[in-house]
Amino acid sequence: LGYGDKAKLAAEKAAEMARHASPYEVARIRAVRTRLAQDLDAAAKAYAEICALIPNSPDAYFDLAGVQEKKGDLTRALVTFRKVLALDPKHPGAHYAVGRVLVKTGDPAGGIEEFNAALDLHRASGNEQGAATALNGLGMAYEYLSQYNEAARNFEQSLAIRERIGNRRGVCDSLRNLSLIRLSQGQYDGASRLAQRSIDVAREIGYSAGIAAGYSSLG
């Protein structure tokens, strides 16, 4: 069979499955497909349908909020992420997402509170990857406030965890974030060394976006 024949068979199989699927399964398939296709309006509609079908599911609202944020509808995304927390107050991903959106909308102090909540939950569960992400969020929020020493402290803690658990892409990002802080502090040699380390790690793992961002931070 050629690629065209295989695609046709796959489409026919999906259509047959859809005929026997529940309303939830149909909406879920549509949501995933449209999100992958970057049709965010259709994806938001499909995820909203899922929320209507299972209104007590934090994960359904979390997916919807993620699409809303990606669309740039930050006000609606914030409301939906907070709906997640109303259903599950100990959802670390939702706390982090609320913090991220608050920083984007100009409320870094509120973001710090949410990032700390996410950090506490990740530490309590032993999720080092999540803790490193929350610390990175704290660094970004403090950078927004021009509190560079506090930003550096959080970025350094995030970097240490990422190095320990072998998250090379995260290491690359943390090094670059630290480089930008040192640049803001006027520590140009230190900023350059950190940026170069970030580029070196990005090259080792084939992280093209990291390479470009590293060179950008070098100026």
Image (tube, rainbow, N blue to C red):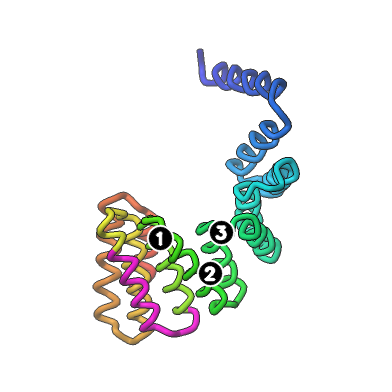
Q: Residue at x 54, y 63 (%)?
A: 95
Side of 83 relative to 191 (left or right): right
Q: Which residue is drawn at 62% across and 50% down?
A: 58
Q: Which of marks 3 and 2 is nearer the N terminus?
A: 3
To which residue does mark 1 refer? 124
Q: Which residue is drawn at 69% across and 31% down?
A: 26
Q: Earlier in the sequence, mark 3 or mark 1?
A: 3
Report the magenta residues as a range.
Answer: 144-160
At mark 3, the secondary structure is: helix
Do we see residue 71 in this rendering?
Answer: no
Q: Are marks 3 and 1 in contact (CB under 8 Å)?
A: no
Residue furthest to the top: 1
Q: In which quarter of the image is residue 186?
A: bottom left
Circle number at residue 94: 3
To which residue does mark 2 refer? 114
Side of 195 relative to 4 (left or right): left
Name the residue type under label 2: Glu
Q: Does 51 sit above or below residue 149?
A: above
Foreground: disc 1 or disc 2:
1
